[in-house]
Image (tube, rainbow, N blue to C red):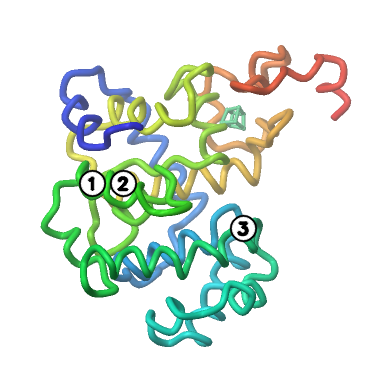
Amino acid sequence: MFCMIQAMQTSMTFAVDNRLPEILDRLRTVYPARVTPLTDPLSQLVFAVTAENAAPSVGLAVYNRVKATFPRWSDLRDAAPERVAQLLVGVPGAPAKAEALPEILRLIEDERGVIELDFLRRLGTDAAGRWLERLPRVTAEIAAAVLSFSDLRRPVPVVGRESARPLRRLGLAPASAPMSALPRHLAEKAPSDWGAEEFGDLGRGLTRLARAACADGRPACGGCALRDLCPSANRNSGDVLAFPGRKAAPAKAARSA
Ligand code: SF4
């Protein structure tokens, strides 16, 4: 599993990609960050597991429904999965998430004696990420989101399935790099003074770009604010469409898509 703090440490020894500050500026202009209050790490964890792979508005609505139904985490801990699943309608993987959420809270309480994650503030970024990734359904991406988007504010790249697309096409990571290696590649190329805000805004901006233009298939480069910075812009070859574990779309099919 990718070691986040190693990535930050190695960022000093790799060449910074000089496009990144400009890429970030443009993404912030085109996709302004929504002002969201920072939450404690446990709230962010429950939100991230609940909303994983859901449209942002759906994920937030479902999380708010869970929170309104179970105002105390101990209520969710004791809830039957069938009851939780009723609240998760609309998010992908609802039955599995309904099993996992109470289990996550039980495991945290078993290990820490309380249902909270404030102890993570005393851990280094790498140790905190590894602790989180031991929990059910907590991927490297979810762990990074907890560390970056909660009030822990750790400077870690958050790379998801969608943001991985423009990230690879922009050449910020090799096209063949596995998902687990993408945060490391990004950290290696980022300016050494980037913090949680920069990495967070970049990740959110790339995700929104992926949905708006850098589609899964043929990207709509004509409307992309990064096209003059992107080596894949307007390429017609299958290269731009191919990702690990996925066959490149035939050129003819791509053109008619
Ligand atoms: S120019 Fe095209 S390939 Fe490059 S990031 Fe923009 S949409 Fe994606």
Checking the image for residue 229, the label placed there is none
79, above or below 173, in the image = below
SS of the residue at dot 3? loop
The answer to which of 53 and 24 lies nearer the viewer is 53
**Residue at which label 2 appears:** 198
The answer to which of 122 and 86 lies nearer the viewer is 86
193, above or below 138, in the image = above
Exactly how many numbered labels are in the figure?
Answer: 3
Image point (81%, 14%), residue name: 251
Q: CA distance from mark 3 to mark 1?
A: 26 Å
Sequence-wise, which precedes: disc 3 or disc 1?
Answer: 3
Image point (27%, 71%), residue name: 116
**Residue at which label 3 appears:** 54
Q: Residue furthest left?
A: 122
Residue 133 percent coordinates (x, y): 35, 47
Residue 167 percent coordinates (x, y): 49, 30
Q: CA distance from mark 3 to mark 2?
A: 23 Å
Sequence-wise, which precedes: disc 3 or disc 2?
Answer: 3
Image point (14%, 52%), residue name: 123
Q: CA distance from mark 2 to mark 1?
A: 6 Å
User: Mark 1, residues whose alpha carbon is within 10 Å: few (<14), some, or many (≥20)?
Assistant: some
Where on the picture, by quarter, is residue 158?
top left
User: Mark 2, residues whose alpha carbon is within 10 Å: few (<14), some, or many (≥20)?
Assistant: many
Q: Is mark 3 within 8 Å of ligand 1?
A: no
**Residue at which label 1 appears:** 195
Residue 59, can we see it? yes
**Circles 2, 1 touching at the beta carbon (< 8 Å):** yes
Tell me the mark number nearer the camera, choosing from 3 and 1: 3
Residue 25, can we see it? no
The answer to which of 99 and 13 lies nearer the viewer is 99
SS of the residue at dot 1? loop
